[in-house]
Image (cartoon, rainbow, N blue to C red):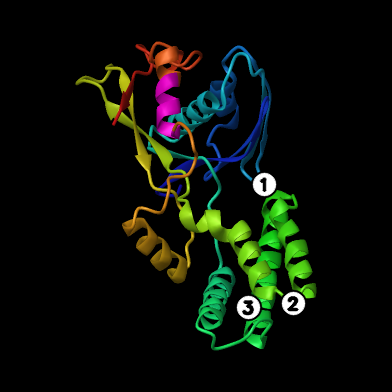
Amino acid sequence: MSAELSVTLIHGMPGRLRLRLSEAPRDVQSFLAAVTAHEGLGDVRYTPVTRSILIRYQTGHLTTEEILLRSAMACSFDHDHVPVTILPDPEKEVMTDVAMLAGLWLLVAALARWSALVGPNSLLEKSAGVGVALAVLQHGWREVREKNMIHPELLTLGYLFAAFVRTRPLRGAAVAWAASFGRHLLQDSAPGVEVRPVAASDGANAPRAYQITPVQPRQRQTPLLAATQAALRSMGLVLEDGGGKSLLEELRNVALAHDRVLEGLGGMHRSGIPLVFR
């Protein structure tokens, strides 16, 4: 078993979730029974090869956050009550060096144009446009491989092509780069949440509490992106991802709605599962 266990939300839509476990359950049947012991949960399938769980549920009875919390607790039970991290997104590389270098070359072209060192539609501007096009194509291909979808950001290539036809490659490249990568540069990934079992009181038969704390996302960043985001963060320009309540707040609401004990999991301990938030 690895030193760190995690439950990752791979894909989610109303009534259907796909989760991935960092380690296979020791007892698959007991693990699935702990996850499904709630009214409104339908078909739950575990795939050993990918360690993924496909869960179908009734949206009127359950929320995504509750299923994530239930799965993390079941995983902790299955591995002798060790801490489990809930990750709202798979670990991924948000921006490659190709995208960052294309942005820097675009900035060089813009400064050269502003200082009148080069004229409109120069070779420098055209090369910056080509670099941005390659970066957008690479980004789009990664989206297809990771999510099996074509992101609308690829439509910026049409605008960039039109800008080349109109001999305005610099403007087209700037719009294409900002539309494709601007949000990744200015926005942090959503933090995860760690579910850690702690002793509620002394004694072998004492109920066990679960401390829930936020953790930083496991996100692969190139040195260039990390340095750029650090500079922007120092100026207060980098925003927290999500645009709404954090995962920690949502899990707190789940616990309060269930009187601090999740239905179907209370039987695993004599006094249920009180949740302690930090």
Q: CA distance from mark 3 to mark 1?
A: 43 Å
Amino acid type indicated by mark 1: Val
The numbered dot on residue 167 is 2
What span is colored magenta in the figure?
Answer: 246-253
Residue at x 73%, y 58% (from the top left corner): 154
Q: Position of residue 4 (x, y in %)?
A: 41, 47
Most extreme residue toward the left is 202
Mark 1 falls on what kind of element?
Answer: loop
Specify whether residue 211 is painted magenta.
Answer: no
Amino acid type indicated by mark 3: Ala
Q: Are marks 2 and 3 in contact (CB under 8 Å)?
A: no
Taking 99 as reference, is 240 above or below it?
A: above
Mark 2 falls on what kind of element?
Answer: loop
Mark 3 falls on what kind of element?
Answer: helix
Quadrant of res 21: top right
The residue pinned by badge 1 equals: 49
The residue pinned by badge 3 equals: 128
User: Tag 1 or tag 2, which sits nearer the N-term?
Assistant: 1
Q: Are marks 2 and 1 in contact (CB under 8 Å)?
A: no
User: Tag 1 or tag 3, which sits nearer the N-term?
Assistant: 1
Taking 77 as reference, is 255 above or below it?
A: above
Q: CA distance from mark 2 to mark 3?
A: 13 Å
User: Tag 3 or tag 2, which sits nearer the N-term?
Assistant: 3
Residue situated in front as seen by the camera: 12 or 238: 238
